[in-house]
Image (cartoon, grey):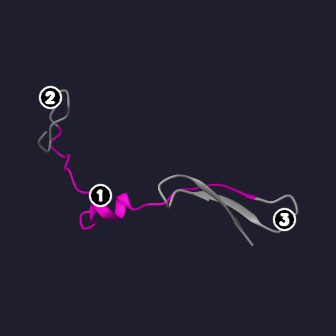
Amino acid sequence: MSAGHGFSGTVYPDLYLTPVFPNTPIEDFMDSVSYRGASFSPDSSKLLVSHNRSGIFNVYAIN
């Protein structure tokens, strides 16, 4: 697809394709961590979180 053309063949003369993160290596996107499910323990002494740093989601307690 060239700049200025839509998928249906429609021409958009003022449309320019620009990289969103032009100088960011792909490794920075692949080496990302997702945090989920933050909540407090019943006695509020710990914060419980899960993340996938190891490749699978694990649960951790933070004092």
Badge 2, how many Cα within 10 Å: few under 14, some, many 20+?
A: few
- Residue to which mark 3 is pinned: 44
What residue do we see at 51% from left, 52% from top?
56
Quick one: SS at disc 1?
A: loop
Secondary structure of the residue carrying numbered label 3: loop
Secondary structure category for the residue under label 2? loop
Type of the residue with mark 2? Gly
Judged from this view, the residue extending furthest toward the right is: 43
In this rendering, the label closer to the viewer, 1 or 3: 3
Furthest-left residue in view?
Answer: 2
What numbered label is drawn on residue 20? Answer: 1
| Spatial separation of the CA atoms under disc 3 and disc 2 | 59 Å
Q: Which residues are magenta?
A: 12-39
Residue 8 at what x, y percent from top left? 19, 26
Q: Identify residue type, mark 3.
A: Ser
Q: Earlier in the sequence, mark 1 or mark 3?
A: 1
Find the residue positioned furthest to the top: 8
Residue at the spot x=27%, y=65% of the render? 25
Q: Are marks 1 and 3 in contact (CB under 8 Å)?
A: no
Pinpoint residue 39: horizontal percent, then vertical percent. Answer: 74, 57
